[in-house]
Image: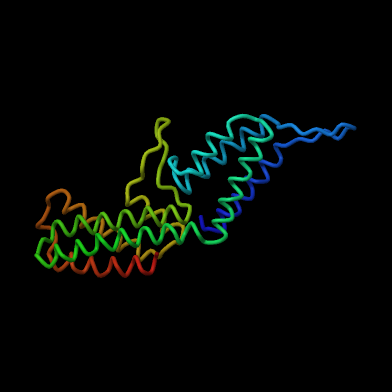
Amino acid sequence: MKIDDLVRRAEELIQLGLKAKQTNKGRNQSIWVECEIFYTFRASSLSFLSNIFSAQHCYYTEFSKTVDAPHLDKTESGIGIIKAVKNELEGGWLTSAKGLISAEIFSDFIEMADHLLSENYKDAAAVTLGSVLEEHLRTLASINGVETKYEKDGKLLPKKADRINADLAGANIYTKLDQKNVTAWLGLRNSAAHGQYDLYTLDQVKIMRSSLVDFMARNS
């Protein structure tokens, strides 16, 4: 799902919130909130906010706390929160902020991997680069509306990196060739993490490092 799709979904939720507000057409016009529509608006909005941000983000917590009953003021507060999110999506702020934060963190870890490689610590470097790769995949998924969790037995569980890789390629966020490269890098990382150090060489980790940086630059 692209940013345009998220903006469109935000607008749908705004319209749903407005639909929950019912007007009496009689002499004494009054407005009340239709319970069934309100709770649909609330559940759908919380799901939307959780997918874009997280259950710990201020937008989610504020919506969950404030929009908790089918009252007019609470419904209008919910509409206002979704409008604020929509404005940030349209302005590109959400994408830019996540990108800046991720870039700073990733830069530190790449420098760490470079130091490890300079000391010929190929195994630690492979694990570090693998962590950078997995976090980048999750960031790409979050920004593009690709689910990073799945439901099992009523619980939300994080998807494995291989599944996110397939989902991103399937959503045309990057190419099938990139998908194959990511699969190979994840395989190398897994070998390092499981102590299978003879399955790859120092040169292969160095190639992974340069290719990973190029991949992240093209898919930022």
Where is residue 123, by image quadrant? bottom left
Q: Residue at x 42, y 37 (%)?
A: 151
Q: Residue 169 in the image: x percent, y percent?
A: 41, 59
Q: How many marks?
A: 0
67 displayed left or right of 156: right
102 displayed left or right of 189: right
207 displayed left or right of 10: left
In this rendering, the answer to whether 140 lies above or below 114 is: above
Quadrant in which the C terminus is drawn: bottom left
Of 65 and 52, nearer the camera is 65
Where is residue 202, by image quadrant? bottom left
In this rendering, the answer to whether 102 lies above or below 50 is: below
Q: Residue at x 55, y 39 (%)?
A: 63
Q: Residue at x 67, y 34 (%)?
A: 37
In this rendering, the answer to whether 191 lies above or below 202 is: above
Of 143 and 178, nearer the camera is 143
Colour approach in the figure: rainbow
Of 74 and 199, nearer the camera is 74
124 displayed left or right of 89: left
Q: Residue 178 in the image: x percent, y percent?
A: 35, 65
Q: Residue 138 in the image: x percent, y percent?
A: 37, 52
Where is residue 214, by image quadrant? bottom left
Q: Residue 112 in the image: x percent, y percent?
A: 19, 61
